[in-house]
Amino acid sequence: MDIEKSTDELVVQMQSITKKFPGVVANDQVDFELRKGEVHALLGENGAGKSTLMNVLAGLYKAESGSITVHGKPANFGSPREAIEAGIGMVHQHFMLVPSQSVTENILLGLDEPRFRMRLTEYNHRVAEMADKYGLHVDPDAKVWQLSVGEQQRVEILKMLYRGADVLIMDEPTAVLAPSEIDELFNTLRSMTDQGKSIVFISHKLHEVMEISDRVTVLQKGKVTSSGLYTKDVSRADLAHLMVGREVVFRVEKKEVQVGDVVLDVKGLEALNDKGIKSLNGVSINVREGEIVGLAGVAGNGQNELAEALVGLREAIEGSVTVNDQDVTNKPVKLGIRHGISLIPADRAKVGTAPNLSVTENVIMKNYDQKPIANGWRVNKKEAGKYATGLKEAYDIIVPTIDTSVRLLSGGNLQKVILAREISSEPKFMVAVQPTRGLDVGAIEGVQKLLLSQRESGAAVLLISEELEELLSLSDRIYVIYEGEIMGEIDDGDIDKIGQMMTGTPLEQIGKEGVN
C-alpha cells in the first residue's frame, strides 16, 4: 500500500466510546481516528466490538458515554439518516436491497428526490456516471435479484456515494465474495481513496488487512489493544497476537490416520438449481472413513447444490447417494440424520440455525425427540438445559445464557453452536460447507481442529471451501468442480493443476500439447 496518499487531515475522531448491552460491554473506552484518503482497518475477533463501534458512528446505536467529532464538529447522531447527512455511510454484511426493484430504484429509495415523477432514464444515466467514476460496474436497469453477490455489494456502495458519503464503513465486506470479486472490491476502494474518500474496513482476515489498509486499529473483547498502527510496520503474526492475546499457529498439524471403508459413494448425480437449470452433471465422488476430502471450485459451480443433494435438501434427478451402503438418494432429511449424516451449511443464519430460538433450542434440534431430552411428546427442559450447558462449555460458546436467541451471537459463536450440535451427534459422514467463512483467525483455528478431530475419530468429511489454502492444509484428497462436473481428483496438492481444473480443464488434458 502507498501510505503517502493519506494526509494528516482528521475526518472522524471517536474518544472514550462505551456501549453496553445486557450482560456485555461491547465497547469499553474505545478511541478511533480516521484520516482523509485512507483505508483504516478495524481488526478483531468475532464479538470484539468492531461492528458495534461503527454502528455507533453510523447512527444505529447510541453510546452510553464518549464523544464523536466529524470534520472537527461535535456529532451526536440519532439515526443513520443524520449520519449520512454528515457524510458517513455504512455497508452492512447483509445487504438491504429490494430484490424486485432495479439498481437505480434501490439507490433512490427513501430519498426526497425524485418526488412525483421518476424520470428513470435520467437517473439511470446519473447512476451509470457515478458507477463509472468509481469503477463500480453494474447495470443501472438490472433487477437486484439478477445480480451476483459482488454486484449487489456495489449497489450498496453506490447508495452511500449517491447520498454524498465521504466516509464509507465496510462491515466484513469480503465475507460473501468470491476471490475475483474481492480483487474488484479492493480496486474500487483504492479508486475511492485516490479521490479523497475515507474507508473504514471492518475485518478479521489478516491477509486482506495487510493488502488493503494503510493503518489498522485492533480490538480485543471490546478494548483497543493497538490504535492507528501503520500496516507496513507490522506483521501478520503481530496482528494475530493483538487480536487474540496469544500466538496463533498458521499451520495445521495433521496426524497419520488409517483410512477405512468408503462411507459416502456418489454416482452420476444430477440436480437442478433454484432457477431450474442443471447445476450438477454426472457427479461421482467418494469419501472414506478417517479422511477429509476437499471440493475446490469457484463459487457458483454447483457446490451448494451438491451439499444439499447429499443431505436430502435438494432433489436429485439422476444418480445415487449412498452412506455406509444405505441408499439415501432423495430420502427425508431425518432418515439421513439416523444414518449419521451431518451438515455444516454455508448459510449459518438461514439454514444452519433458527435465529429467533435460543441456544438450547438450536443445539437439541437433532435429538429433541430422544431420551433423556424427550419426555414422552414433551421436551424435558431441565435435561435440555443440562445438555446445552455442557456443549456451551465444551465448545467455548460465548453467550450470556443458554436461553439467549442465537440471532444475537457473533458469527464465530453462531458457528460454534452449529458445530456443537452436529459433532455431538457423532456423525459417520459430515458435509462442511465454507465452515470458516467470515470467522476470525482464532475461530478458524478452532474450527479446523474440530474437523481434524472428526477425521481422527473415523468420520468421513467432505470439505467444500473456496479457500484454497484451507483445502490444501486439511484435505487428504481434493476433487475440483467446474460448471457442475468433476474435472479431476488429486492427492499431491498441485496448485497449478487445481487452478487449471477450476477454470474448466479436465485433469486428463493438463500437460497435453496445446493445453496450458
Image (cartoon, rainbow, N blue to C red):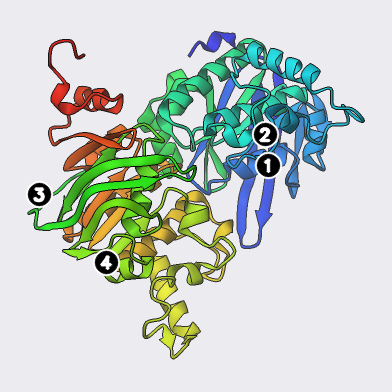
Q: Which residue corresponds to the image point at 89% horizontal and 27% vertical from the top-left? A: 117
Q: How far apart are the alpha carbons under marks 3 and 1?
A: 47 Å
Amino acid on which disc 1 is placed: Asn
Element type where label 1 sits in the image: helix
Amino acid on which disc 4 is placed: Gly
Which numbered disc, 2 or 4, marks the residue closer to the eye? 4
- The disc placed on residue 90 is 2
Q: How far apart are the alpha carbons under marks 1 and 2?
A: 8 Å
Q: How far apart are the alpha carbons under marks 1 and 4?
A: 42 Å
Q: Is residue 227 visible?
A: no
Amino acid on which disc 3 is placed: Glu
Q: Which residue corresponds to the image point at 37% horizontal and 67% vertical from the top-left? A: 332
Contact (CB < 8 A) between labels 1 and 4?
Answer: no
Element type where label 2 sits in the image: strand
Contact (CB < 8 A) between labels 2 and 3?
Answer: no
Q: Is residue 469 above or below residue 185?
A: below
Residue at image mark 3: 256
Query: On the picture, is 283 further left or further right than 36?
Result: left
Which numbered disc, 1 or 2, marks the residue closer to the eye? 2
